[in-house]
Amino acid sequence: MKGFFKTAAAWLSVGLATCALAQDPANLLMPPPREVTYYDATFHLDPQTVIVLAAGTEQESAFAADQLAERIEKLSGLKLQVLPEKDAGTRSHAILFGEIGRGGTTKQIADRLPISSLMELGDEGYYLQVTDSLVVVLANSSAGLFYGSTSLAALLEGANFDEIPGVTIYDWPVFRWRGVLCDFRHHQLPNLETLEQTVRHLSRYKLNTLLLDFGDVFRYASHPKIAAGRGALDKKEVEELQSFAAQRNVRIIPVIETAGDLPDILNLPEYRELAAFPGSSHLDLSKAETRTFLSEVSFELCEAFASPYVVVKVSIPLASPEAFAVVRRHLAFVLETLGKLNKKPILSFDMIHSGLPLALDLPADALFFQSRQSPEQLDFAVAERTLFVLPIADGTSLLPDIGARLLPLQRAARSAA
């Protein structure tokens, strides 16, 4: 361990000359890093290279190192060892992952860095430095180490798959919430594998939130007729998806439609009596049976998802003061129900224009989401309560067209991550 730190300390003491590179490494990263310095150096991967987990690094942070090793093997064919620092010996050609504040080598390296930049990193930021003989990735958490690993893999992909350009990066996100919305209410739900692929794409661009609007494609134990005979996720699959996403710092949040736009459910014989009128896609909000139904499905969704948040949608026209009063009472009931389930609401931004949520005594920590950005919405965004999302699936296709959505996803990452 002493030998390893001695190498790291010596590396930090060397004054590396900055240079202009033919290809800006920052162009390989999305979003672009906050602070970048380039060096006339190149780290060459070879069979003797090891990936080292600094002493005190949490086990969940090892995932970032494992993912990098897997990516390197796929790109270059090299199968690198991932070792705890105590087993690394005096090897000097290494990639070091460490959590700041854990003591040992990580702390001694961090103590030599500008405190102002380190303080900016927060929970999701990272520090990355590449020299001829050593690569260091430091962060305050497993999320930061994962993003550092992601950037390192991107630099590798932009080179020759076995070399990384000399660079120092301090990077952290502008916004705490960065995500997309997948609406599956009107078409076939992708299988679990495709949803995991979506999570991989999000994490690659350092987006950390996925909103899933299930509609009738979640298997409710209390309402087995819903989703019968079509693709749907059950509670076990949702838990598996959340576990997969959590490792990649992506939170999964369910969306609950509480009033309208539910034709696939209300067309079922068992639920037609809940419709506002025959053939309607809106619930009759005045019925006790409607409230019972919403309580049951809300309970199951909240039980399946670990997130403390639930997106609440009220898709129903407000054509009169009477309708406004009915929906206002209905939303109050929904928020009370979620409160009993220890969930916090994220409300559809469309409600702002109707004045509906402003007429309620909303919880102080209530958030709002929107799927489109427009100038008239920016003033509200300044209040730091808007959750911007970008759809990657819509009603025109059976599966999320990830390829067609990559460009807007990249633009969103550049401007909002």
Image: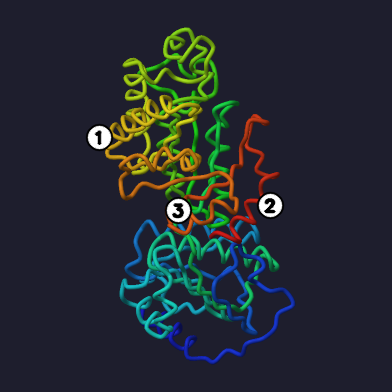
The amino acid sitting under disc 1 is: Lys
Q: Within 10 Å of the Cα at label 2, are there few (<14), some (14-19), or many (20+) other Cα atoms?
A: few
Quadrant in the rendering for residue 36:
bottom right
Q: Within 10 Å of the Cα at label 3, are there few (<14), some (14-19), or many (20+) other Cα atoms?
A: many
Cα distance between the residues tagged 2 and 1: 41 Å
* Rendered image coloring scheme: rainbow
Quadrant in the rendering for residue 188:
top right
Helix, strand, or loop for circle 1?
A: helix
Look at mark 3 in the image and give the residue it sits on: 249
Look at mark 2 in the image and give the residue it sits on: 407
Cα distance between the residues tagged 3 and 2: 22 Å
Nearest the viewer among 62 and 122 is 122
The amino acid sitting under disc 3 is: Asn
Q: How many marks?
A: 3
* Residue drawn 34% across the image and 31% down it: 334
Look at mark 1 in the image and give the residue it sits on: 340
Could you tell which of marks 1 and 3 lies nearer the N-terminus? 3
* Residue drawn 41% across the image and 76% down it: 118
- Quarter of the image for the N terminus: give it: bottom left
- Horizontally, residue 17 falls left or right of residue 237, namely right
Which residue in the rendered view is the most extreme toward the right? 22
Q: Are marks 3 and 2 in contact (CB under 8 Å)?
A: no
* Residue drawn 38% across the image and 67% down it: 140
Q: Nearer the viewer, mark 2 or mark 1?
A: 1
- Horizontally, residue 203 falls left or right of residue 240, namely right
Q: Nearer the viewer, mark 3 or mark 2?
A: 2
Nearest the viewer among 170 and 41 is 170
Q: Residue 83 placed where, x, y %?
A: 43, 65
Q: Is residue 217 above or below residue 10?
A: above
Which residue in the rendered view is the most extreme toward the left? 340
Nearest the viewer among 331 and 156 is 331
Helix, strand, or loop for circle 2?
A: helix
